[in-house]
Image (cartoon, rainbow, N blue to C red):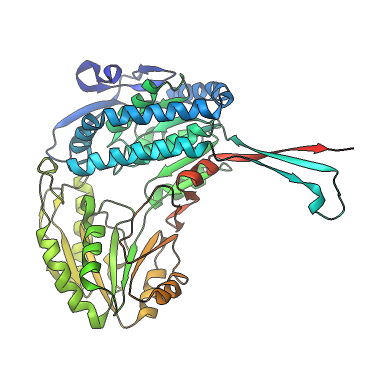
Amino acid sequence: MFKCIFKDQNIYKCLLNGAWVESKSGKREKIFSPVDGSLVGEVQSMTKEEVDNFVSSAKRAQKDWANKTLNERADIIHRAADILDREKEVIAEILVKEIAKNKKSSLSEVARTVDFMHFTAEEGKRVVGESIASDSFPGFGKKKISIVNRVPLGVVLAISPFNYPVNLSASKIAPALVAGNSVVFKPPTQGAISGLYLAQVFCEAGVPAGVLNAITGQGREIGDYLVGHPGINMIAFTGSSKVGMHISKVAGMIPLLLELGGKDAAIVLEDADIESTAKEIVSGAFSYSGQRCTAVKRVLVIDKVADKLISAILPLINKLKVGNPTNDCDITPLISNEAADYVQELIEDAINKNAKLLVGNKRQNNLVYPTLFDNVTVDMRLAWEEPFGPVLPIMRVKDENEAIKIANDSEYGLQSSIFTSDIDKAFEISAQLEVGTVQVNSKTERGPDHFPFIGVKSSGMGTQGIRYSIEAMSRSKATVINLK
């Protein structure tokens, strides 16, 4: 297994037209572990000229793939899921080394991806067309019938992030393939090895040559060229809002599915179950060291219950295990020193503007200890910017209207949570929040994966979720039968 990409002392190749190839430039990118700086492996740095081969190969292979039956395509996705399940231990170990995710969470990511792929294979069979008679529209009578089918878009460019390089890659690849598209897959540089493992999984499952091509290289070298390539028919991207906005400008008039940043707020009302709320907030804020777009990134709590909530949150934070992911720690090193530097900037800005540090503000290189602030105000960067790290601001508000205003003043609109025992109040507030999803009495999070996952404002474009992703990666095509 994986012999094609495991040869040559951890030098990993790209998948092109069913073969594992190296860049003709001879350039490679070294992947160092965020855990200890050790070399995990080297991936190819493909050039713009080589990008053309990956796109043209995918384009050539797409029509034959689309002509396969839905059952044939679904069977291959099922097989890929089974292979991924078989190799979960191997891939989880790579995740631990490559992105500093603890073993339990790494196994969970792979297991969730297996379920996602099986569900996608079955759901693909149910995304079907319709027939429409003309007699329901005035003036046409029974003269016409429109037969509407779902057809693939062509070549989908799938670009995934470092934090879930298996799950958030498969969540693009599997729906695209089952819909009949071919895929050019660009994994993140930090996370590329995990992504190449996934590509090999699909390869072994029987995805035909060229239907899935996996390319690695620095975004600054090939990113814009890939995104603006005339052979790309659709782009599915997960990453920062800044990059997502840039992609939307470069890509032009092709469909986009963008999953971007967030500043998810947990709104805590006076009647909330404080103990349960505290557990959800700590889990939501500090899972994978806060490196999640759906992490709880600020708490907007009614002042009357703020002290009580803090008293419940602090012991839970103090129980979090900090250190090496191989020791199954909850808080592990951030993806880079630069990421830790940015988190530290936000912490220092809050301190300088008189936020109350309750715990944390401790750092060892890129390992940032869980940090909690009280009395964070709207003039602080931490109130608005996405830290992507283990730091949580508590903002006291006088009432729910102030909480709603602060939540909505954000440039982001991914998710929010409402903690209350009054379901009518939850619906009332939910209707006013400018986000894609509102969680009631739970942390902000993605999933289950067949639920719609939506970002508005700077948090994204389009709707994901298994059925929604398949529909986004296909289009309606009508054939009109004219009757005599």
Q: Is residue 196 visible?
A: no
Q: Position of residue 431 (x, y in %)?
A: 47, 70
Quarter occupied by residue 154: top right
* Residue closer to the observer: 430 or 379: 430
Q: Is residue 292 left or right of residue 97?
A: right
Q: Which residue lies at the image location 22% right of the left edge and 77% below the top edge? A: 306
Q: Which quadrant, please, contains the N terminus?
A: top left
Q: Is residue 278 visible?
A: yes
In the rendering, at what x and y percent does residue 426 appear? 40, 73
Q: Of residues 95 and 418, which is closer to you in this image?
A: 418
Q: Position of residue 354 (x, y in %)?
A: 18, 75
Q: How many marks?
A: 0
Q: Is residue 437 left or right of residue 369?
A: right
* Residue drawn at (49%, 27%) of the image: 73
Quadrant location of the C terminus in the rendered image: top right
Q: Nearer the viewer, residue 23 or 154?
A: 154
Give the residue at x 30% y 61%.
443
Q: In the rendered view, tell whether residue 299 sits above or below residue 17.
A: below
Query: Is 327 displayed left or right of 66 in the figure?
Result: left
Residue furthest right in the image: 484
**Which one is nearer the viewer's eye here, 415 or 138?**
138
From what the image shows, is residue 365 above or below residue 117? below
x, y percent for residue 235: 49, 40
Q: Say which quarter of the image contains residue 406.
A: bottom left
Q: Is residue 347 above or below residue 337?
A: below
**Residue at horizontal 32 percent and vertical 27 percent from the top:** 83
- Up the image or down, 391 lies above or below 31; here it is below
